[in-house]
Every structure is written in structure tokens, then in C-alpha cells.
Image: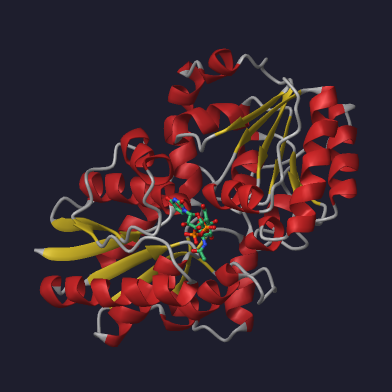
Amino acid sequence: MKKVVSVVGARPNFMKVAPIHKAMKRLAPETAHLICHTGQHYDEKMSKVFFVDLELPEPDFYLGVGGGTHATQTAKTMIEFEKIIESERPDLVVVVGDVNSTIACSLVAVKLGVRVMHVEAGLRSGDRTMPEEINRLLTDAIADYLCVSEPSGLENLDREGVAKEKVFHVGNVMIDSLTNYLPMADASNVLDRLGVERGRYVLVTLHRPANVDDPKFLARLSQTLERFARERKVVFPVHPRTRKNMDANGVAFPDSENLLALDPIGYVDFLALTKNAEVVVTDSGGIQEETTKLGVPCVTVRDNTERPVTVTLGTNYLVGTDLAKVEERTLAILGGERKEGRVPELWDGKAAERIVEIIERVV
Ligand code: UD1
């Protein structure tokens, strides 16, 4: 029996591997599909809840890598994943996204002569100070099969000289999960539980080191949240990195009953919150894509994006990290100013099927 191992490590990986796992079970039952969780994210609220929401089985392998510096996290993942590859000798390793687990496992597999497929290949922010950009560049340089989610990925790989035979425009697997779970999100009562009204609240998520590791940004953020809370309810599920840094720098949340600073939220409830938000303010990669699919305005607190189609075609505004500008844009949207978005090609809920077809052809 042929064997494929898919790797998950951090929160944004779970919703990408879930549809691939389901499509493998349905369309390639003769090929074993095993899941390896590196343990890069380990909290119940950053990991376990996603396995439950996305109906993923218990991982076949759990490496228990945990937090640490980039070197520690990457090195530990490599040491543990090498043992799995040596004992299992899979025909293919599938890695997704751009987290440390993605590059660590790709490097191990390739050096042991096991082929690697990178899902969400070719994205480039052009900013090499971002850890994810380094992970993307290196993973794409060594992977055998590159599955691309948006047209910019094709252009970037072409410019970098990647052979065309290795590149497949399959669409966006994250949108597969969104499409699958939208009915469940529609049935969620999370808005009632939080006491927010459909289409009348601001949803905020921030976790990028470039933002939340900067004490000045955090201090200014408190004012921004306060400004939003004067207009609307503000729902802010706080990432562990952001919370730790706020605590360490003595930055408090503004004292407003309109601000709901929460623990991280599960997949289905978060999808419901995104779909029904009046505007989303974020520095996440994936949320830029989800809002574009849902037609919800998104204000991205970054200077660049590796997902330009969300700006050129979708509902995303790339405003930079100056929070005065973030406030200005967000308030304009609350005032009714918004652009019409369109859904990019192949963001149709069927990317995983296309990926499985390729897997079946190559293993
Ligand atoms: C990682 C990814 C990032 C992704 C993000 C989504 C890399 C380089 N970065 O960043 O691309 O957008 O995940 O969340 O891979 N922590 C916990 N509990 C957890 C996980 C983390 O408390 O379950 C703490 C860690 O100890 C650390 C901080 O949160 O102090 C950050 O975690 P880390 O895994 O380093 O990276 P993220 O910022 O989450």
C-alpha cells in the first residue's frame, strides 16, 4: 500500500490538511494517509479544538515539539520527524503553509530521498524579515511538487526559475474548509453568546511578531481598540503571543464594556464571527483569504501581503502598521465605504480533490 504523510504544526495548518485528509479517504482509499502533528502549537485552544471542529482523527504521530526559539523549534522538529520518516518510509510527504514545521519536515524528507509536496506554494511577501517568508522560499526551493493557490504564486515560481512540470495551480484548500463548514458556522450561536449583532461589530486578530513584539505598537493598539469600541462592539480573540507580550509590557486592554478580549476561538465559531463581522482587522495571512471569499471587508495591519489577489480582486485593504491609518480605514468602512470584491479563480471548495488527483498520479 502506498503511504502519504501530511504534516500539521501550527493553527493555520489544521484547516488546510483537513480537506486533503477527507479527499484522500474518499478518492484514494487504496493509499494510506497518515497525519503527523509536530506539536508546534500545543494549547487546547490553539490545536485540539481544531481537530474536533474539523473532524480530524487523532494524529498518527505526535512529535511534542512545543515552543522555543526558531532554531530550537525547527531543530527539534527535524530530529523527531527524521525518526518518523526512517520508520515509515512514506512515498510522499505533504506540507502546507509557511510555519516552522513546514520547512523543518520538508528538509528532513528531501534529505532522506522522500518526495515532498508543498501546498500553498509560491506565495511571496517580498519581506525577508518575516520568518514565514524564509520558510516559503526554502520549502519551495526543495519541494518536488508545488501546489499554488493564486496567480501570483505561478508568477513568483516562474521568476525563481522553478520548472513548470513541478507547479500545479490547484486553488485554495483553506477555502475548501470554509465551504465545508459554513453550514455549521451558520448554525453556531456564538454571536448570541457574545451578545453581538450580525453585521455590527469589529473583529480583530493580531499576532505577527513585527506588530505584537513591539511595545510601542501594543501601547498604541490599546487606543485603537478604545476608538473602535466607541463605535461598535469589538471582538478580539487574543493569540497567546499577543497576550504574553501585553502582560510583559504592562499594556492593559481599554476599560470598555464594548471590548470583548477573549481566548483563542475554535474554527467553526471563528468562521461564524468572520462571516458576520462588519469589518475584520487582522495581520493574519489566512483571514485575508477567508474574508475575500466571504465578501467581508478586511483591514490588513501589514506593509505587504503574500496574498495580493485578496487586494486586487478581493475585499482586502492593505493599510500598513500605522494604527492611525488602520483606524481611519476601519472607521470609513463602518461609515459605509467599501469596495466590491470578487472570488479568485479555483477558490471553489475543490482544491483538495485536485491535490489528491496529483498525489495519485505521482505516488
Ligand atoms: C506561528 C507561525 C505563524 C502563524 C501562527 C498562527 C511560524 C514561524 N509562525 O506563529 O506563521 O501565523 O503560528 O498562530 O511558524 N504559544 C502558546 N500556546 C500554543 C502555541 C504557542 O502559548 O499552543 C506561545 C508560544 O510559547 C510562544 C508564542 O505563543 O511564546 C508564539 O508561538 P510560536 O509557535 O512561536 O509562533 P506563532 O506566533 O504562533
Indicate how the structure is coloured in the image.
Answer: secondary structure
Which image quadrant is residue 199 in? top right
Q: Nearer the viewer, residue 263 or 169?
A: 263
Q: Where is residue 58 in the image (x, y as percent from the top left)?
A: 21, 45
Q: Quadrant of the N terminus?
A: bottom left
Q: Which residue is drawn at 85% across and 33% down?
A: 227
Q: Position of residue 273 (x, y in %)?
A: 59, 28
Q: Which residue is drawn at 71% across and 57% down?
A: 211
Q: Which residue is drawn at 33% across and 41% down?
A: 48
Left or right side of 122 for 212: right
Residue 43 seen in the figure: yes
Q: Where is residue 222 in the image (x, y as percent from the top left)?
A: 78, 41
Q: Which of 313 and 164 is in front in this view?
A: 313
Residue 145 seen in the figure: no
Which image quadrant is residue 101 in? bottom left
Number of residue marks: 0
Q: In which quarter of the image is the C terminus?
A: bottom left
- Compared with 120, 91 (above or below) is below
Q: Where is residue 161 in the image (x, y as percent from the top left)?
A: 57, 86
Q: Which residue is drawn at 24% across and 63% down?
A: 5
Q: Which residue lies furthest to the left in this view?
A: 1
- Compared with 162, 122 (above or below) is above
Which image quadrant is residue 133 in? bottom right
